[in-house]
Image (cartoon, grey):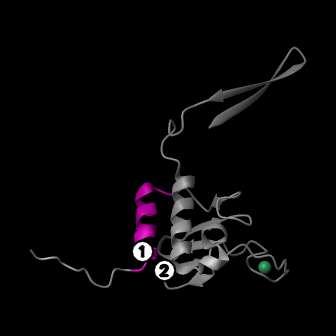
Amino acid sequence: MGIYWKARTGGIMSEIEIIVPEGMFGPDKDYLVDAIIRAIAETYGDERNWPTKYGVNYENDVFMMKSYCWCGGDDCPWCTGEMPNFWYKPTDFKVTWYKFIGRSMEFNRPIPIGECAEILSSCLPKQEEIIKVEE
Ligand SMILES: [Zn+2]
């Protein structure tokens, strides 16, 4: 993680880079959301379409995911930016990316850690039955 400054001193432009340890400013939710979206895509996608890279086209009552759209259509809600690539419906959390999950990824608002956990558990399929082992 680096922070960059450009400073003009006496007509000379100088650049300063300060390196801080990862995590110093708190949890990096970009990575967390990135991992959650990849996990969901892997669950619902066909591995031949590389869902952990591109995402998956899938929608249910809880969430919608759509891979980056290449159609370029003027009336395409994804190409015009009307629709995100990932939409968690219960809290209206939306994520967009450019071509690949994680690339130029943007959220419609900041997301608390607890909501990340909720998204993961709500979007992955429920375990239908729990097998108890009795000794
Ligand atoms: Zn499109």
Q: Can residue 25 be seen from the camera position used here?
A: yes
- Near mark 2 (Cα within 10 A), the count class, few <14, some 14-19 or many ≥20, is few
Q: Which residue is mark 1?
A: 122
Residue at screen point 55% across, 54% down: 31
- Residue 86: x %, y % from top left: 60, 72
Residue at the left extreme, as displayed: 135
Please state the horizontal and vertical placement of residue 57, each as a whole percent of the image: 63, 81
Q: Quadrant of ligand 1?
A: bottom right
Which of the pair 63/9 is nearer the observer? 63
Tell me, yes or no, whether the two marked residues, 2 and 1, touch with CB atoms within 8 Å.
yes
The magenta-colored residue range is 111-125
Q: Is residue 71 above or below residue 91?
A: below
Dominant SS type (magenta): helix
Rendered-image quadrant of the C terminus: bottom left
Label placed on residue 62:
2
| Mark 2–mark 1 distance (CA, rounded to whole Å) | 7 Å
Q: Amino acid at mark 1?
A: Ser
Along the line of sight, which residue is nearer the eye, 39 or 64? Answer: 39
Q: Is residue 102 left or right of residue 69?
A: left
Query: Vertically, is 4 above or below 98?
Result: above
Of residues 126 and 51, the one nearer the viewer is 51
